[in-house]
């Protein structure tokens, strides 16, 4: 497969019977170049991307190439099991399922942009110490940036994870882009009725080419958790603070990416993490004991109806959007209301009509922290009378994914409401403590 | 005016020539009841709401009332200047413009729900100490819950504020519901080219009937700031922490309601507040010196085009929403993308078409914290090529309001882009420090 190649370069490589992964040799401008053909993400269609022995990737235009030679077909030490599983010589304890994202990405030599890499071998190479803590097996399920993740992929990830656990792995690590990692975590969390071990999503905010990369530590720590933790939940494991002291294991339904670039971007909202991992000491410190324990079997029920919409309210929004959504076939709307769960009262009639038509309208808050309460103000009461369901302290994103799952299982509006308010995996936290709200910096900063 | 009354109660009061504010007396079920007629927010149409001398409101059904008597027409000490201004005996220093919200609300006796109250006199009564710090004038501009706030009201608020400053007030305090307070603050901030004094929005998270109400302190502190602060910016002044030690003055374009119910819900994002107010000590502690100073005149330019949309991206969203928005006449879209500013690549062609049609597409991040950077990943670069404008570290809500303002002033897409990236009042912060990211609690909590 010549991934990413088009036009002249594709033609050139095909005509030489060369695939991605093959070792080639060529001469150009008096230089001799030898290396492995890499997938192309070049904008130009005449560039071959070659990984040199020193680890660098270069791009070579095919014009003026001489003495092109296929030295060796795809190196067999790059194990890429795509879908089908090779029989393992030694039973693995933790399975790493790679879906793409920065944790498995490389900088595109030509433009400096980051693109997904190919093999989990590359990941494991980051940190050979991994072999000391668990017997690993790895699978590249797909190689996409997480902004392109879709509900249909969630199902594939869930199935792969189930298979890995059914085969006796103690836990599963899922390498995933950070952009939509929390959505995937929620999707997996609602899909599993029971788990024999944890599913630990892990990503990185800095690519592995950078000295400040969080890839190796996050991955190492995720493997530690997958193998040893007593909880069998879908979790996200990422840096806990900006230094390298510990990672945090967040409940997948209670976590959000809260910063575009910090390594400790993932933080629990309206909850505390399940555990803190001191990776150097190989210590998993549990922060609570109300986790879901490892069960005897893995029960999967992954179905999603994407006929939903996430509507963020703002002053001046035209309520006719509701009519459009319904006419386009939407079956449920999660509203990100203001404050305790409000929209303008102009929406009342639209919501009334929608719920009369069997469309679910659920209310969350754009404040993110805290719980909606639609009994305090007149507006909230009016909205409830129009059929809107207040969704407790659920994150808007979690509520949306939950609704996709619920709608794939129920069509009766009362039952949908009841399921949305059923606490399946800790997505609703009935008891809040002041510590959930982070502490902001309230002093002066002297900028140079 | 018999605000809120309908049906039988309206008929009854009208026939007795009774208005809201009038002192009445009646007998019912053997009891003698005397009090002031309050506006009705009762769902029943036969209830008269009466404020007793002890301050409590009660609801009395008209059936069975005997000996009804109008004791005194509307008490003249309730000064409600609606729109028109009474000539002041003494020149005021701070003008309080009341728009509604919890800070001026009362609990609805009948249902326990909160409704907007009527007079600013009621507000000032909360805290007589206010008279010690500034000469006050008050105006009820409107009385709406802030979830019903609209761009057309922003203009009225801006005009009132300008009038108050032009008349020589040192600063303006705007009592506002907290739900959409940050949107209004942004709108006012973009509307004023220059200000002679600060505009301080203030609200409360707990109604004044509750012992834990933050109304009096927030209001007192806002008046202190309006009169004495050296900056002439549009700001939000609310509790800084959950106790009553200090309030914080946030730049209006860099603040968000981050909790549904906490008193310190308002926090600066990607910035630090302008000042910390130790109200007991009457001390305004400046946290920075890069504020906008008081100017010679008030220059107002408040226009908003509401043909915009705030689109929050999520996995599985159908990109056809873009086509609908454009067909409905939308001129600009603020995308709340994932991570550094992404959507799935499925959106690329839709954005390309939109920008070709002159529709502005701006990118912010649903992470809220941090800056978008669309040069790091292939997706970001593709989106930029399709015409999407990365909006630095602007909050999605601020970017949306700014876009409404910009679209009301420009129609050329290049000029719109350029204005959106012009830093008018600190909505873009080019330098970030680690302190901007709050500290989450990462330890165990023992729940009883």
Image: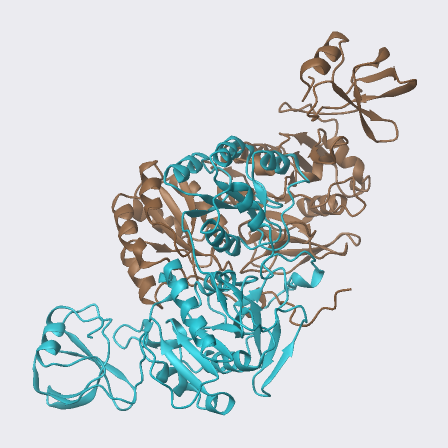
Chain colours: A cyan, B brown
The answer to whether residue A79 is above or below residue B91 is below
State left or right for residue B284 relative to residue B59: left
Is residue A186 left or right of B67 when viewed as pictured? left
**From what the image shows, is residue A447 above or below residue A328?**
below
Give whichever of B56, A414 is nearer the camera. Answer: A414
Based on the displayed image, in which of its 4 quarters is residue B179 positioned? top right
Residue B257's x, y, as percent? 60, 50
Q: Give residue B149's quadrant in the image.
A: top right
Of A380 and B412, nearer the camera is: A380
* Number of marks present in the image shown: 0
The location of residue A178, given as percent across then percent down, is 44, 67
As drawn, the residue found furthest toward the front would be A296
State the image coordinates of residue A420 (x, y, percent, origin top left).
56, 50
Is residue A337 something one can see in this rendering? no
Residue A300 shown left or right of residue A246 in the figure: left
Residue at 45% from the left image edge and 49% from the top image edge: B399
A278, above or below B76, in the image: below
Establish if B339 lies above or below A164: above
Task: Name the image quarter holding the N terminus of chain A.
Answer: bottom left
- Spot the residue most to the top: B15
Q: Is residue A281 visible in the rendered structure shown here?
A: yes
User: What is the x, y in percent for residue B301?
Assistant: 47, 37
């Amino acid at each position: 497969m010549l991934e990413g190649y088009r036009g002249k370069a594709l033609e050139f490589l095909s005509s030489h019977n060369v695939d991605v992964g093959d070792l080639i040799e060529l001469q150009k401008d008096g230089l001799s170049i030898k290396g492995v053909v890499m997938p192309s993400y070049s904008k130009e269609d005449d560039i071959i991307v070659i990984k040199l022995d020193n680890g660098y990737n270069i791009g070579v235009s095919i014009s003026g190439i001489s003495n092109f030679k296929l030295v060796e077909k795809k190196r067999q030490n790059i194990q890429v099991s795509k879908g089908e599983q090779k029989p393992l010589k030694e039973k693995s304890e933790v399975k790493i399922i790679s879906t793409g994202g920065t944790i498995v990405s490389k900088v595109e030599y030509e433009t400096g942009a980051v693109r997904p890499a190919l093999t989990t071998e590359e990941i494991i190479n980051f940190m050979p110490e991994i072999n000391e803590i668990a017997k690993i097996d790895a699978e590249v399920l797909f190689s996409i940036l997480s902004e392109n993740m879709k509900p249909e992929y969630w199902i594939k990830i869930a199935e792969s994870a189930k298979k890995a656990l059914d085969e006796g792995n103690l836990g599963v690590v899922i390498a995933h882009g950070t952009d939509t990692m929390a959505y995937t975590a929620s999707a997996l969390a609602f899909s599993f009725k029971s788990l024999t071990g944890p599913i630990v999503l892990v990503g990185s905010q800095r690519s592995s080419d950078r000295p400040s990369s969080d890839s190796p530590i996050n991955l190492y720590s995720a493997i530690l958790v997958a193998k040893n933790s007593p909880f069998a939940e879908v979790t996200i494991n990422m840096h806990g603070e900006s230094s390298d002291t510990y990672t945090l294991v967040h409940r997948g339904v209670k976590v959000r990416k809260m910063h575009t670039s910090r390594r400790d971007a993932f933080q629990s909202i309206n909850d505390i993490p399940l555990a803190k991992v001191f990776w150097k000491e190989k210590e998993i410190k549990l922060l609570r004991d109300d986790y879901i324990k490892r069960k005897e079997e893995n029960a999967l029920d992954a179905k999603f109806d994407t006929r939903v919409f996430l509507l963020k309210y703002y002053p001046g929004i035209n309520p006719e959007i509701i009519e459009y959504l319904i006419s386009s076939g939407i079956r449920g709307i999660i509203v990100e209301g203001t404050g305790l769960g409000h929209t303008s009262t102009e929406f009342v009639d639209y919501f009334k009509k929608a719920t009369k038509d069997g469309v679910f309208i659920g209310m969350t808050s754009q404040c993110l922290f805290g719980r909606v309460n639609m009994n305090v103000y007149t507006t909230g009461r009016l909205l409830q009378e129009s059929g809107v369901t207040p969704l407790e302290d659920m994150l808007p994103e979690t509520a949306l994914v939950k609704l996709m799952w619920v709608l794939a299982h129920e069509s009766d509006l009362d039952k949908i409401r009841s399921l949305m308010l059923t606490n399946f995996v800790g997505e609703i936290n009935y008891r809040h403590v002041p510590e959930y709200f982070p502490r902001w910096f309230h002093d002066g900063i002297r900028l140079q």
